[in-house]
Image (cartoon, coloured by chain):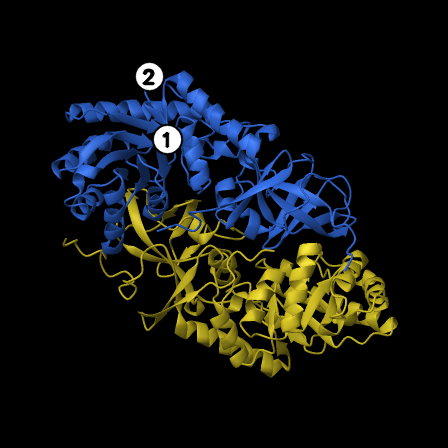
Chain colours: A blue, B yellow
Amino acid sequence: MSLPSQYAGTVTTALQTPPTPSLVIDEERLDHNISGMAAFAARAGLALRPHVKTHKSVEIARRQVAGGAIGITVATISEAEVFATAGLTDIFIAYPLWLDVDKAARLRRVLTITPLLIGIDSVEGAARLAEGATGLSDRLSVLVEVDSGHHRSGVLPSQVGRVASAAAELGLDVAGVFTFPGHSYSPDKREVAAADEMQALVEAVAALTREGITARIVSGGSTPSVQFSDASVLTELRPGVYVFGDAQQWELGTCSSDDIALTVLATVVSRSPERVVADAGSKALAADRGAFSSGFGRLLDYPEARLSAISEHHVTITGIDCPPGTRLRVVPNHVCSAVNLADEYVVERAGRVVATWPVDARGRNI
Amino acid sequence: MSLPSQYAGTVTTALQTPPTPSLVIDEERLDHNISGMAAFAARAGLALRPHVKTHKSVEIARRQVAGGAIGITVATISEAEVFATAGLTDIFIAYPLWLDVDKAARLRRVLTITPLLIGIDSVEGAARLAEGATGLSDRLSVLVEVDSGHHRSGVLPSQVGRVASAAAELGLDVAGVFTFPGHSYSPDKREVAAADEMQALVEAVAALTREGITARIVSGGSTPSVQFSDASVLTELRPGVYVFGDAQQWELGTCSSDDIALTVLATVVSRSPERVVADAGSKALAADRGAFSSGFGRLLDYPEARLSAISEHHVTITGIDCPPGTRLRVVPNHVCSAVNLADEYVVERAGRVVATWPVDARGRNI
């Protein structure tokens, strides 16, 4: 069988090996992003505890720690299981866990491997945590989640003292406070969100102080807001997306296209005078789309193109013309969601495949 | 350890076992939906070839075939691998495949297991298919994809004759035409989209006839448009979502909440005066949202509630109030995307867990 060349022209000629759609890492850019954020945190005098829900990869978490991160942040108990089992330590589950019998048993197993920081935002949640961790409570500290303007989970600064004092009475070690300024995901809100974050954390720390609790940890930072962090307020940063970048960060101005370390390799399968269609749909890119997004992702090599529609196995692209078979590097809008759809990364260095890495914690939602 | 009951009240008291978030099937509703569509197709005198990208489950595909489906539809070669290996036959890959060396090898392996129908929408794609299937071409028939108004892949009816005659000259068996009237996903477009679909297929069949090719298969049908199908035009239907239903179908009026056979079980983890937050975010529900959607999904038991925001592990809900620990049955907007995030289904009958089934073809994008 002598198929004609599967690569129709000069587009991404370096990326010829993986089948499509595939999740492709540019390893040099990845390492550059890891060291860049570590250097930023060091200059600011802040600890770095990156959120690994972005990449769900033990290999990348190890590189972050080798680069200077003090530990990692996860979103779920089952993510903590993966990373603790792989030897990562100093893990923060930045989520207001609600323990049932199953989750309490899972959490106890993780606590036998490594101590944990865990978020709380209610007295009831703290009570379950205290009971669920009975006998292992010396392995556990809590951070009270503060709502700094994103209006998701977390309590208002005025409620922090109430939750913290109740947790302390339950016998939990209250180590401090944390917040996620998610309203930074808007082009004109990045600096405003960081200011909201700092003000809310100052008030939260003061509330702890009034209860006689010292905030040893004051944890904040989203990728869009992190550059506006105030080191006189925070002790640590928890950005996640910075390792890869994505179309949201590109369009927010947090990164440039030269920083983007992860793309979904796709093949053009259909062409008409009005559009081309490639084989990376919402089951490869995810359907995330911010109010500010220009489309359902971007093309790394054709920034003028628009990803105007998406379905499960099709992405419709306008603003470029190329024949079927052309390979395109698609930048997903939200890289955390795209990574969670794939079982493995293809890793390239200087345009050549050098490794595959598993997405170790894919689907670890519980 | 004597944790307090993890179930705070009367909400979904029957659904107490699975951890959250979990993908839960109501088996009786599933079977009802399978038999209902089979009966509809039989009454209309049409064959039923359901799209299994919705459920990606060998067990459910077998029930569909046992219920009268003539075969199945898939979107990718790797989905075909899963279902062919499991013994399903008469498989249609409803996608304009672009074969490279890897995909040609995969396709040849599937062809050795079962004959296939495959979509084409370009002469170049057909040429690759003919070459990739050399020696196995008697196991393969093609259907020309027609753009009936969704403006994704497919050629206009006026181009069908050109593509079909070229495919026939390449030695491919041209069995007919197919279309997906995806513009039916709009509350006031369902009947219009079905009319567009029928008109485009009539023109496409006429184009084949002019080339001396008989359209043995005329395949159409999306879940929102299927009830408006014209049996004098079509020979078969390919709906997918009908097995489960979802919030899109509910809000389009294609199904009622009583028909919905799949929910994501979630736990309320945070509560404030303005909102509650549950633990099924975009990594459990997917972020799909139609222009007509009321939010990021619906609550099966609280139709007045609104899922106003979503992030990876949080869904923000307004319009209800309930304490942390309350379990909620969340109906995803687009069930195909939600299923593709999970590794297994929890199957319930009369509110009791009776089985778990794997999502056999999860992540099979290649």
Tag 2's secondary structure?
A: loop
Q: Position of residue A249 (x, y in %)?
A: 53, 32
Q: Position of residue B3 (x, y in %)?
A: 17, 53
Q: Tell me where residue A192 sits by quadrant.
A: top left
Q: Chain of mark 1?
A: A
Instruction: Give me the residue at 36% from left, 36% from top.
Output: A73
Q: Is residue B29 above or below residue B305?
A: below
Q: Tell me where residue A124 sits by quadrant.
A: top left
Q: A302 or B181, which lies in front? A: A302
Instruction: Give me the residue at 73% from left, 46% from top.
Output: A326
Q: Amino acid at mark 2?
A: Ser
Q: Is residue A239 visible?
A: no
Q: Earlier in the sequence, mark 1 or mark 2?
A: 1
Which residue position is annotated with label 2? A232
Quadrant of the image containing the C terminus of chain B: bottom right
Instruction: Give me the residue at 46% from left, 67% from top.
Output: B256
Mark 1 is surrounded, within 10 Å at the Cα level, by few (under 14), some (14 to 19) or many (20 or more) other residues, namely many
From the viewer's perspective, is A342 left or right of B117? left
Which residue position is annotated with label 1? A49
